[in-house]
Amino acid sequence: MNLNKKELETSISKFWDDSILPTLIEYIKIPNKSPSFDPDWKENGHMDRVLSMATVWAKEHMPEDAELIIKETPGRTPIILIDIPGEKDGNILMYGHLDKQPEMEGWDSDLGPWTPVIKENKLFGRGGADDGYALFASLSSIKSLKEQAARTPRILVLIEFCEESGSPDLPHYIESCQDLIGTPDLVICLDSGAGDYNRFWTTTSLRGLIGCSLKVEVLKEGVHSGGASGHVPSSFRVARQLLSRLENEKTGEINLDELKTKIPDHRITETEKLVGILGDEVVKEFPWKGDMKPSTDDNVEGVLRRTWLPTLSVVGAGGLPPSNNAGNVLRPFTQLQLSIRIPPLVDHLKAQEAVRDVLTKKPPYNAKVTVSFEEPASGWNAPEIAPWLATSMKESSKCYYGEDACSMSEGGTIPFMAMLGEQFPKAQFVITGVLGPGSNAHGPNEFLHIPYAKKLTACIASIINDFPS
């Protein structure tokens, strides 16, 4: 049907102000860290608090004929399912998550991970943008359509609680809820990013992720560095040698062919268009320190490096005392937490085995090397977009933002998208989100851009309305 889009936008904006933002403020206060960062999540009760808050809110604002279902298998994180009957053929699946990344240091003095603050039309705090808003925005978009008596297909909203841990519990629920999920024709995910805050953005590919802990042990206990160094190899030096097998430390290039793929030509063309629109903003969006420079002066190459090339990041360490409490001791072990991004189209299981082999075989000096892997996640590459969806996204962006829609590859990971892409190859995907420049998901000072989120919600409502009969 023809929507009154001005009325829809006004309704969504008011609903955000009256119902979504107050709830997100309370949500941010709860340290609902993903199980990888809070092994005692059940005992601590934060996840149950968020689950209760979300379900109470959803029951109040979902359509009268909708059904809310909570699934929680013992020992696993829960999921929320909201089943909304439709008036026309088709099946839409909407996705988000309510678990969070850990605190991270470096927040501004007036901000904090569990301290919600609104300033300059931005809501600061952990998890609001990544992606606690998804459940609320999804139901807001549906509510606005119901207000105009728009006919929609059947819609299933699925919210998980372990995405930031690699979604280890999700395959279990996908299998056990197979009949309820059905076969989606359209998947809408609100857990991705935006190139700027001036238009509707969709994500066309995501990298996979291999997370692991590398532990190198050389002694049973620490000893005086003056008496042992030189004779006893440093565990840090051994770890450094092992990482050099995996990565060229001068260029950042990954040495393993199992972690590489050929970038499709149309993704290179897409990246060139992206850089043509954003220019140097693809560099300026990062909080560089001093005169620090990127790894390349070619902006297209830089974007491809963070979306279609494998990379290694050391994101944590163990066995290293704080600098102000470090004695002259040769430490018994060094433990490094590795985050290895792998390109779309790479087999994540083969990649993981290649990483295991290169880090553990024939270690220097026969040091004891242990590699412990988290659940690996596959990357994802979008199928060809249907003409109706391309037109809908373009027109929605033009209507609410005043600019044409644009697409981009993302360097992050959403494990559920790879699962769905493999299981439902004929489905269409709208992968989008509010994580634009400076929003800093996973880092300090994470924020949700409120005006952008309101317009994004309106775009999603319009796309659902345009779903063909």
Image (spheres, rainbow, N blue to C red):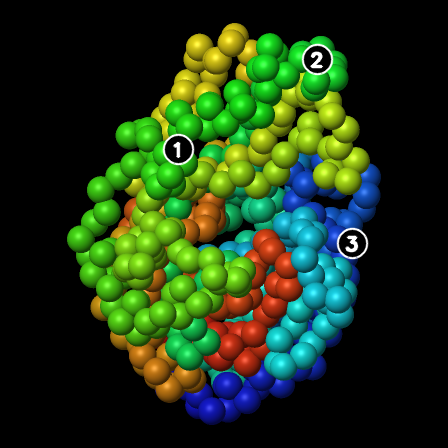
**Callout 1, which amino acid?**
Glu
Label 3 CA crowd tier, 10 Å (few <14, some 14–19, many 20+): some
Q: Label 1, on which residue?
A: 247
Label 1 CA crowd tier, 10 Å (few <14, some 14–19, many 20+): some
Q: Label 3, on which residue?
A: 49
Task: Give left or right: position of 457 versus 33.
Answer: left
Q: Which mark is residue 227?
A: 2
**Callout 3, which amino acid?**
Arg
Residue 24: x %, y % from top left: 69, 68
Q: Residue at x 30, y 67 (%)?
A: 274
> In terms of depth relative to the viewer, which is nearer, 348 or 396?
348
**Callout 2, which amino acid?**
Gly
Q: Residue at x 59, y 15 (%)?
A: 230
Q: Is residue 105 visible?
A: yes
- Of circles 2 and 1, which is in front? 2
Whether 143 is drawn above or below 100: the answer is: below
Quadrant of the image containing the C terminus: bottom left
Residue 406: x %, y % from top left: 32, 70
Q: Secondary structure at mark 3?
A: helix
Q: Are marks 3 and 2 in contact (CB under 8 Å)?
A: no
Outermost residue toward the top in this view: 366
